[in-house]
Amino acid sequence: MTGVDDPRVQALRGAVARLRRQLAVLPGELPDRAAADEELAALDAMVSHGLPEVSRLRRSLLLIAGAVGSVSALSPALTEVREGIDRFGELPRRRF
């Protein structure tokens, strides 16, 4: 199965698109709006070009959450993006 055919990819792309739309119409000032837009675009590009690296997906999620996490209106869409990323699996545990 290629990334394009993978239902996880399609679900995550849909969640990213919804968050991008909601962020675009959010009224008021959001200091990190540009950072969130850029990382959402990068996330969409990652999943558009095959199966992405889980650690990179999680890094993007952290950056996006940091940029929009305090905006309660975006919380459901952000949760949907997180759940989409979670579908790709857990990060392997490090052994020390």
Image (cartoon, grey):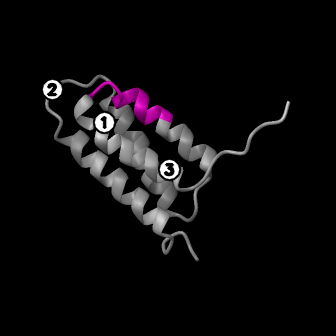
Residue drawn 51% across the image and 70% down it = 6
Residue 69 in percent (x, y) is at 36, 29
Q: Which segment did they paint magenta?
A: 62-71
Residue where numbered disc 2 is placed:
28
The numbered mark, 3 or 2, whose residue comes first in the sequence reads 2
- Element class at badge 2: loop
**Residue 1 position in % (x across, y down):** 58, 77
The furthest residue to the left = 27
Q: Which residue is mark 3?
A: 85
Left or right, residue 54 beside residue 96? left
Q: Residue at x 83, y 35 (%)?
A: 95
Q: Amino acid at mark 3?
A: Ile
Residue type at mark 2 is: Gly
Q: Residue at x 42, y 65 (%)?
A: 10
Q: Which residue is mark 1?
A: 75
Q: Earlier in the sequence, mark 3 or mark 1?
A: 1
Residue 80 in the image: x percent, y percent?
Answer: 37, 48
Could you say whether the residue bearing mark 1 is in a helix, strand or loop? Answer: helix
**What is the C-alpha distance between the residues marked 3 and 1?**
15 Å
Q: Give me the residue at 56% from left, 65% from top.
A: 50
